[in-house]
Structures are given as C-alpha cells and as structure tokens.
Amino acid sequence: MTKTKNILRLETVSKIYRMDGVSVKALDNVSLAIMEGEFVSIIGPSGSGKSTLMHIVGCLDTPTSGKVLLDDQEISQMTERQLAQVRNKKIGFVFQQFNLLPRTSALDNVSLPLLYNGTTSSQIAKKAAEVLGKVGLGERLDHHPNQLSGGQQQRVAIARALITDPSIIIADEPTGNLDSKSGVEVMEIFKKLHQQGRTVILVTHDDNIANKAQRIIRLKDGKVIN
Amino acid sequence: MQLKQLIRIATKSLIVNRSRSFLTALGVIIGVAAVILLVSVGSGLKDYITGQMQDMGSNLIMVVPGDIDIEQTGASGGAASGAFSSIAASKLELRDAEEIERSLPQIKDTAAVVMAPGLASYKSETVSGQIIGTTQNYINIRSSEFETGSFFTQSEVNSGRKVTILGHTVAHELFGNQNPVGEKIKVGDYRYLVMGVMKEQGGQGSLTSDDKIFVPITTAQRQFGLDNISIIFTQVSSSDEVASAVPLIEAVMLKRHDEEDFTVIDQKEILSTVSSILDTLTIALGGIAAISLLVGGIGIMNIMLVSVTERTREIGLRKALGATPEVILTQFLIEAVFLSVGGGIIGILLGSGGALLLNNFIPMTVTAWSIILAFVVSAGVGIIFGIAPARRASLLSPIAALRYE
Ligand SMILES: Nc1ncnc2c1ncn2[C@@H]1O[C@H](COP(=O)(O)OP(=O)(O)OP(=O)(O)O)[C@@H](O)[C@H]1O
Ligand SMILES: [Mg+2]
C-alpha cells in the first residue's frame, strides 16, 4: 500500500449556518489533506466545528463553499442520491450516541448498510456475523441494544461501520458516552483497524485519546490552527 | 436496491412496532368489515326477496285491480298503498280469469284470488290467518308443496264445497303434531273439512303460504261476501312467451272492461324493480360504510405522520448509512400499504365471518364484489394517505435527523 496517495482533500472549505438572519461560520476556509491508511485525530473545544467537519467529510452534508475530494471525487456538487451512495460505499461512520435501532438485534443493526447496496440476504447475515465477531461480539448476535452495555453498543456501531469495507472510518467522539474502560477497549479496536491499513479519522475532546493517532489536527472557531 | 429488501425492511419495522401497527390498521379493519357487513345485509335482503318471489312460481303474469304504474309503485310506498285501496274497489271478476284462459291458448293456467283476514279455530285453539279463495289451478301456478293431503279440485270449486287447505303455521298452531287432514275446523261461521297442509315456506306477507287458509273461490265469495277479486294469476309455459302474452291479456281484459281499471304485470318486471331498489339500498349502505374506510385512511396518514416525526433519528440513520430519498419514500409507502392492506384483509375476514354468523338471524349474502372493492379501496387508501408521510420522511436531511432530540 502506497502511503502517498491522498484519500481526502479539503480546499478552502467553509460552512455557514444561517438561521433567523443570524449566520454562524462553523468552518472557515479549512484546507487539509489526509493520506490513505493514516490515523488522524481532530481535536478542539466545543463549538469549534469538529462535527460540522466530520459531516462534510462523511458526505452527510455539503460545504457552503470550497471543494471536498474523496478518492479524487468532488463531492460538494453531488445530489442527495449520489451522496447516499458514496456514504454507503466509502464511509463508515461511528457516532457519539451509537445510533442503533432500538428493539432490533445486533445482527440486524449491523446489517443495515448492506440493505442499501443490493447484497443478498444470506450474504448479509453471514457478513454481519463475521464483523460482529471481529469486534468481539460473536456471542451477542441476537441481543437488542437495551441488553448491551454502552461499550458493547459502540462496538456494534463500529461493526456496522465496517461491514461495507469502507475506505474511511469516521468517528465523532466515539468514546464520549463511555466509561474509561470501555473507551480504552473501543480505542483498541480503532488502533487495530489502523494497523490493518484503514484510514481512521477520530474526533475527540480528550488529549490522551488524540495522542493515540499519528497526526493531530486542531480546530478553533472553525479554523485549523496547527 | 431491490424491492424484496425494502419489503423486508418495512415488514420488520411494522413488526418491531406491532401494537402501533395494529392500532393504525384498526381504522381500516373496522371500515372494511363495515363495508362488507352492510353490503352483505343489502344483497342478502335482495337475494331473500327475489328468492321469495321466484318461489311464487315461474313465468307468471298477474292482473291486479286499478291502473297502477309499476315503476312508480317501486319508487314510493304511497303508490303501493294506492294499489291496496284499489283492491276494495276491484272490478275484476272471476269471469275475466275464465275468459283469459279460454281465449289465449298460450296461457297454461289461470287462478283468480280473493282474500281477507280471518280466524280459524279447532277445539279450543284459534289462530288468525289470511283467507285465500281461489281455484284449483292455483296450486299449479304457485309452486307450493304439500306436507300432507292435496289441494281442492275443480269439482269442489264448482260446487262450492266447504273444504280448506292450511298453511304450515296455521295447521301447526291449531293441531300441534296431530294430522289435520280429515278434521273439521271452523272458519267464520261454518265448518270446513281440512284436505291438506302446505310445507313450511318461511318469509312473511303475501308471498308466503304459511299463514294462509285456502278455500274454493266460490265458497269464499258465498260465505264471506268476497266479491272483489284481488289478483288473477296466469302462467305461460316459458319465459319467452311472457312479453308477448302481456299485451294479449290486456286486450282480452279491455274487451270486457270499458276502461282500464286493471293492470297487467309480469313477475320479471316486479323482480327487476325490486332488485333495482335493493341495489340502490346496498350501494347506499356500502357508501356509508366506505366513509368509515376513508376515516380509517386518514387515521393511517395521521399516525404515519406522527411516526415519521417519532422515527426522525431512524430515518436520519438509514440515510446516513446509504438509503437514498427514493428508498426511504418507498419504505414508508410500503409500510402504509401493508398497514392498509393488512387491515383490509383482517377486515375482510372479520366482515365475512361476521356476515356468515349473522346469517343465522337475518339474511346476509357476502358478495365477491364487495370483498374485491374493499381490498382495492384499502390498498388505494394506503397509497394515497401514505404519500404525505413518506414524502416528509424522504425529505429529511440526515444530519438534522441525527441531531433531532
Ligand atoms: N444545524 C445547525 N444550525 C445552526 N448552527 C449550527 C448547526 N450545526 C452546528 N451549528 C453551529 O456550528 C458551530 C460548530 O458546531 P459543531 O457541532 O461542529 O461543533 P463541535 O466542535 O462538534 O462541538 P462539540 O464538541 O460540542 O460537539 C457551533 O457554533 C454550532 O452552534
Ligand atoms: Mg460535535
């Protein structure tokens, strides 16, 4: 694997939220590049625009201005439909609040992304069980979120992010809702994913966690400051 | 994205929220069941009445007193009561019946009828019934069967004998389980010999034989002063001859009467009038019930809209994981259609089951068209009322939905 290729490039990206006549500049001319296989953490105070940046990088949102290139593909001009397909193929998103479907088994939760790309049912079940095994939940396939601890729920969410074999894993404060022990376990998984060659972008408040990454990008008031 | 996968997603999410799904479908369940039940009542009534009329005998043409417009009789009760008052002033005669039979070879049988309410008694029992004075041919025309005995003959009519045939109810109320044939009962002031008992026919009014006391027309005219003929039944051999026979009978009657103080009606005409009234009734009943189906559809829309709001996070998540707006739209439409069609199927089962059960008490006929209509309408309701919530869901932006508390 060549570590020279940029998997992600942002060129003067700005995001302005307008509401009731007040506009908030959440991202202000952000330019950055992330290489394939890199483990990057993004750190900054609350309100500095970390989540906004992750949403744009994760193709959940488009910038007000500037260019976003994912795998050399310009995404800022894509339609909702195209963005949905890019999210499904290339992005694995892990949220702070897990965002698992309630009253739905771990297996079915992990299966979700595959429902939207035409995988056959038998393959879905097989793959879902496989990735749950990888995050150490091979015995918990039928458990519902309310039968799992926070750390286990987050591991289900990581398995869901991994199931489509995406080029980038994006995690927005994945340990924010976990106790320190579960947090360490979850971080171990991200470290392993990085060692297996995946690109990992991780948002955090916590310097200790940020230090586990190869590179730290600091945000403040919507600007990159290092 | 295959439809199969989407159907699976929709079904799963309906099952996960099964009690809400059931309550949402309840409006459609009730609406469809109501449509089927009410339509069954209407068509059951129609089948019952037309069945009763067919039991009267086939290929009948009737001459009744007065100048009645049959269409109008059908449309309003007022005209019908006019027809009854004209019986009292009837100018029909026994000779009319004889003349029709004599001059028209295609007429197989004729029977003139006089009638009046009356009492019959045997020992200490007394029942009230309808006295029918008629001729021997009556039994050929009206397809009635006998429990025991037989109808009176021409010689008994000619000589005005005091004999009687009893309807099923009359016979059983007077005699219980005893065989009435050969016994004498008192009708009016005189004793009559019972010659036979009719089989039970069911139903009510002038169409059933159950409450009738049949006597020879000559006897009736003499003993009860029943000079006014209420109706003359005539019968042709095949249904093809009915239409051509009607004007011929009219011509014979007009020759004997100076003015048109009678009306010739054929059975089919009555049947079609009655069925068109009952069809209208059925459609009206179905229409009223269909309104409840509409309300059921609005219920689906309402709960689906609430459910879209409630499931904002789920929708956002699905979109974040790669569901396109079309996929979300389709999922919610499928959910709505499944709810309404599922409700429709349950409603069809409940409605037809209920109709079959109630059939023991009132005549009910479950019709295929009401089932098909209910099914199609409930599916349509699902699509129409599912569109608004599905569109709302598909337009949610993934981040806004994920941030939603
Ligand atoms: N949908 C929105 N509408 C209006 N303003 C928004 C919206 N989303 C974010 N903002 C604003 O943009 C700025 C950046 O928000 P963002 O969520 O990216 O911060 P953050 O760095 O993730 O903070 P935290 O660490 O608390 O999660 C904030 O000032 C926030 O109020
Ligand atoms: Mg944030």
Image: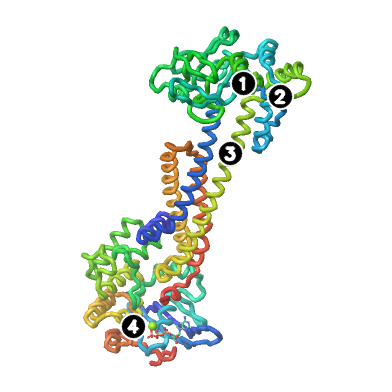
Place of residue B177 in the rendered image (x, y in percent of width and height, measured from the top left) = 38, 21
Within 10 Å of the Cα at label 4, are there few (<14), some (14-19), or many (20+) other Cα atoms? Answer: many
Q: Say whether residue A200 is left or right of residue B292.
A: left
Place of residue B310 in the rendered image (x, y in percent of width and height, measured from the top left) = 42, 69
Q: Which residue is mark 4?
A: A40
Determine whether label 2 and label 3 are within 8 Å by CB: no
- Quarter, ligand 2: bottom left
For the N terminus of chain B, the quadrant is: bottom left
Q: Chain of mark 2?
A: B
**SS of the residue at dot 1?**
strand
Q: Which residue is mark 3?
A: B279
Q: Which residue is mark 2?
A: B262
Marks 2 and 4, Cα distance to the nearest angstrom? 105 Å
Q: Residue at x 46, y 47 (%)?
A: B33
Nearest-to-viewer mark from 1 and 4:
1
Residue situated in front as seen by the camera: B140 or B208: B208
Marks 1 and 3, Cα distance to the nearest angstrom? 33 Å
Say which label, 1 or 3, has the lower sequence index: 1
Q: Which mark is on residue B114?
A: 1
Three-letter amino acid code at the position of disc 2: Phe
For the C terminus of chain B, the quadrant is: bottom left
